[in-house]
Amino acid sequence: MDLITDLINQLNGIVWGPVMLTLILGTGFFLMVGLKLMPVQKLGYGFRMLWQGRDGKGEGDISPFNALMTSLSATIGTGNIAGVATAIFMGGPGALFWMWCTALVGMATKYAEALLAVHFREKDEKGNHVGGPMFYIRNGLGTKWAWLGASFAIFGALAGFGIGNTVQANSVADALNSKLGISHLASGITIAILTALVLIGGIRRIATVAGKLVPFMAISYVLAGLVVLTLKSAELPDAISLIFTHAFTPTAATGGFAGAAVWAAIRFGVARGIFSNEAGLGSAPIAHAAARTDSPVRQGTVAMLGTFIDTIIVCSITGLVIIVSGAWTSGENGASLTSMAFESALPGVGGYIVTFGIAIFAFTTLLGWSFYGEKCVEYLFGIRSIMPFRILWIIAIPVGATAQLDFIWLLADTLNALMALPNLIALLLLSPVVFKLTKDYFSVRN
C-alpha cells in the first residue's frame, strides 16, 4: 500500500504541477482573449439571463436557473470553506489573489464548456437530454476522438466516488461530530437515506432540491461573512493590502504561520481555486446540458456565473474573514482555521455557521456529483447502469463517513486532474465553434 501511495503521490505532483496549472490557466486566458473579454463585459447580461431562466424555453429537462444551481451544488462545498483556508495556510494571504485570477479566466472556460455541452447534447433512451465533455468530444471532434471522451467518463466516474462522495460524507460527519457529538456512522446513514430519497427522482429532483438549498445556504453564509467583515472593518484595508502585496512577494513567518514563497501563493491559490470552482474539469457542463434552453450561448452566460459566485463571492468571503480575524497566523489549517476565524468575531455562533455550512454544502456537492458520475457511467455502459450506480453511490456514503480518507483524498485529487486533460484538449480544439456561435449570437443583439 505504501508503494501505491508513493506512486500516486508522484503522479499527483506531475498532474497538478506547473504544466497542468499553466494549461488550465492558459486555456482560460486563450478563451477569454478569443471571446474578446465577453464573460467580463456580459456579466450583467448573464445575471439577467439567470433571472429570466427560472422557467426556460426550448428543449431540455430542467430550467436554466436550476441547471446553474445543480452545478453550484457540486462546486460550492468543502473547497469554499476548507480549501480556501488550506490555500492561505500553505501560500499566505497572496493565495487569495491567485484564486481570483483563476476565477476570472475560469469564467471563459465555464462559458465555453456549457455552450459546447448544449450545442452537442443528445437524448438518451428515456428521452432525457445528456451532454458534457464526452459528448462534445465525440460529436464535435468525431469518432476518432471517442477514446478521449471515454477517458473523461472513466476518470469522472471514479473521481466522483472520491471527491464527490466519500470525502464529502466524511467532511459532514467530522463537522457534526466535533460540534454536536453525533457519531460518524449515524451521520453517514442519515446522509445516505436523504441522498437516496433525492436520487429516486433523478435530475429533476436533484435540480429542485439544489434550487432551494444552494441559494439559501450560500446567501446565509455570505451574509454571516459580511457581518464579520463589518465588525472587523478597521482591519479590512490592511487585509486587502496583504493579499495584493503577498501575491508578488514572499510572506514571512509569523506566529504559527511558517512563511511562504511567491510560488506557493500561486500554486496553492490556483490549485484550490480550480478545486473549488471546477472550471476546466468538465463536470459542470454535464448539468448545463440538461437545461431547458434554445440557445447554447445564453446557457453559457448563465453557466459562467457559477465561477463568479463560487470564487469571487463565496471564497472571497471565507478568505477575507480568515485574514481580517488574524486567524491565518494561528497555525490552524482547513475547516478548523475557518471555524476559528468566524468564532473569533462571532463568539458562540461563528463555529456553528461553519459547521452547518460544511454540512449543507457537502450534502449538495454529494447530490451534484451523483448526477455527474451517473452520466459518465451511462455514457460508458448505457442506461441500464444507472440504477446499479445509484445503489453503489448510496452504499459508499456511510463507508466514507466512517473511514480514514487520506489515500482517497490523494487519489480523487489526482483523478480530478486527469479529468481535466481530455476536457481542456477538447476546449482548445473546439474553440472556433465557441467563438463563432458567440459572435453570431451577440452580433444581432448589439
Image (cartoon, rainbow, N blue to C red):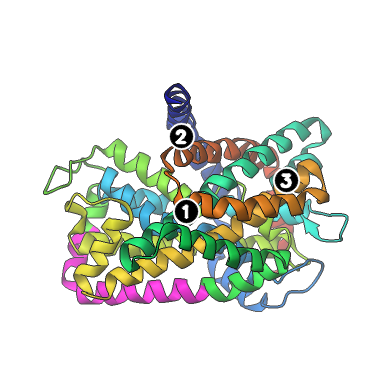
- Distance between the alpha carbons at the discs numbered 2 and 1: 26 Å
Q: Indicate the secondary structure of the residue bearing disc 1.
A: helix
Indicate the quadrant where residue 442 lies.
bottom right
Which residues make up the magenta segment? 215-240
Residue of label 2: 16
**Main secondary structure found in the magenta portion:** helix
**Residue mark closest to the camera, 3 vs 1:** 1
| Residue 414 spot, x, y in % from top left | 50, 36
Task: Looking at the image, tell me whether mark 2 or mark 1 is earlier in sequence order.
Answer: 2
The local secondary structure at tag 2 comes to loop
Residue 1 lies in the magenta-colored region? no
Of 52 and 388, nearer the camera is 388
Above or below, comparing residue 215 to residue 316 in the picture? below
| Residue found at x 55% / y 47% | 33
Give, as a three-letter code, the residue at label 3: Val
Q: Which residue is pictured at 32% across the width and 49% down the height?
A: 86
| In this rendering, the label closer to the viewer, 2 or 1 | 1
Circle 2: residue type: Trp
Q: Nearer the viewer, residue 283 or 7?
A: 7
Q: Amino acid at mark 1?
A: Ala
Q: Residue 377, which numbered label?
A: 3
Indicate which label's residue lies in the foreground, 2 or 3.
3
Q: Tell me the residue at 80%/59% (across/down).
A: 129
Mark 1 nearby-residue class (10 Å; few <14, some 14–19, many ≥20):
many
Q: Residue 120 got which mark?
A: none
Dots 3, 1 in contact, CB < 8 A: no
**Side of 17 where 435 appears, left or right:** right
- Reading the image, the residue beneath label 1 is 401
